[in-house]
Image: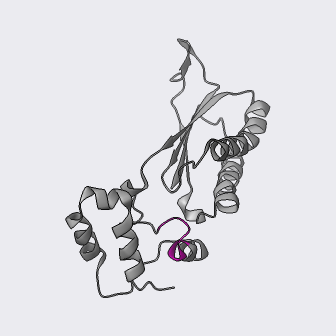
């Protein structure tokens, strides 16, 4: 999951602006990163008037964006810089056109602390993740084992196994998923 959490003053972004930005952000991950489109979440939050301050002074023209990464983390400085350039390519023209003051931060979190619809997402680049990309939704286990049964297996694993994600990968490989 990348989650883009965008805070601005009321009516700063039109509905069309929001749609265009959400589409552009999603393309960064689907066209460049191979992620399923449904992983990408964009949430626009309009702050109450006069609730944004910069340097102690009211600033209703300020936009703050927090980008949360769980599905992937940056593998290198070059990877990070390429991502930041893509983000700048989307944001800079829009924000400059609107005369905004803006900033964004990217936060990375361990993948093993993430679930979608109660499911542990498949390993990055795996055949199952490719299936999720194709379906644009999480696949549900077809086997007789319920999600609750699979989760109970996870609670019996030690922390090192979960952090290394080896066991989770084996569970995914062992399950027979529907198309």
Identify the image quadrant of residue 54: top right
Identify the image quadrant of residue 133: bottom right
Image spot of residue 69 (x, y percent) = 51, 49
Is residue 119 visible to us here?
A: no
Q: Nearest the camera: 149 or 47?
A: 149
Q: Nearest the camera: 53 or 148?
A: 148
Q: Is residue 66 left or right of residue 91?
A: left
- Indicate whether 149 appears above or below 77: below
Is 136 covered by the magenta stretch?
Answer: no
- Indicate whether 37 appears above or below 13: below
Report the number of numbered marks.
0
Q: Nearest the camera: 26 or 10?
A: 26
- Indicate whether 99 appears above or below 28: above
Residue located farthest toward the left when viewing the structure as drawn: 156
- Residue drawn where x is 55% and y is 64% of the image: 38
Q: Which colour style is shown?
A: one colour
- Residue drawn where x is 46% and y is 86% of the image: 178
Is 126 covered by the magenta stretch?
Answer: yes
Which segment is the magenta one?
A: 123-129
Q: Is residue 162 left or right of residue 46?
A: left
Is residue 91 visible to us here?
A: yes
- Indicate whether 55 appears above or below 99: above
- Residue drawn where x is 39% and y is 86% of the image: 142
Image spot of residue 144 (x, y percent) = 30, 88
Image spot of residue 108 (x, y percent) = 49, 44
């Amino acid at each position: 999951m990348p989650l883009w959490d965008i805070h601005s003053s009321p009516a700063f972004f039109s509905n069309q602006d929001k749609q265009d930005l959400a589409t552009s952000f999603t393309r960064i991950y689907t066209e460049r990163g191979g992620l399923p489109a449904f992983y990408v979440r964009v949430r626009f939050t309009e702050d109450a008037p006069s609730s944004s301050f910069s340097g102690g002074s009211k600033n209703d023209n300020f936009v703050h964006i927090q980008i949360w990464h769980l599905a992937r983390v940056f593998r290198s400085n070059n990877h990070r810089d390429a991502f930041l350039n893509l983000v700048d390519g989307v944001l800079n023209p829009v924000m400059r056109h609107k005369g905004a003051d803006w900033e964004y931060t990217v936060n990375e979190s361990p993948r093993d602390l993430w679930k979608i619809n109660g499911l542990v997402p498949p390993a990055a680049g795996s055949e199952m993740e490719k299936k999720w990309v194709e379906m644009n939704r999480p696949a549900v286990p077809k086997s007789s084992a319920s999600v609750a049964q699979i989760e109970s297996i996870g609670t019996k694993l030690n922390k090192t196994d979960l952090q290394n994600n080896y066991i989770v990968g084996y569970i995914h490989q062992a399950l027979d998923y529907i198309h």
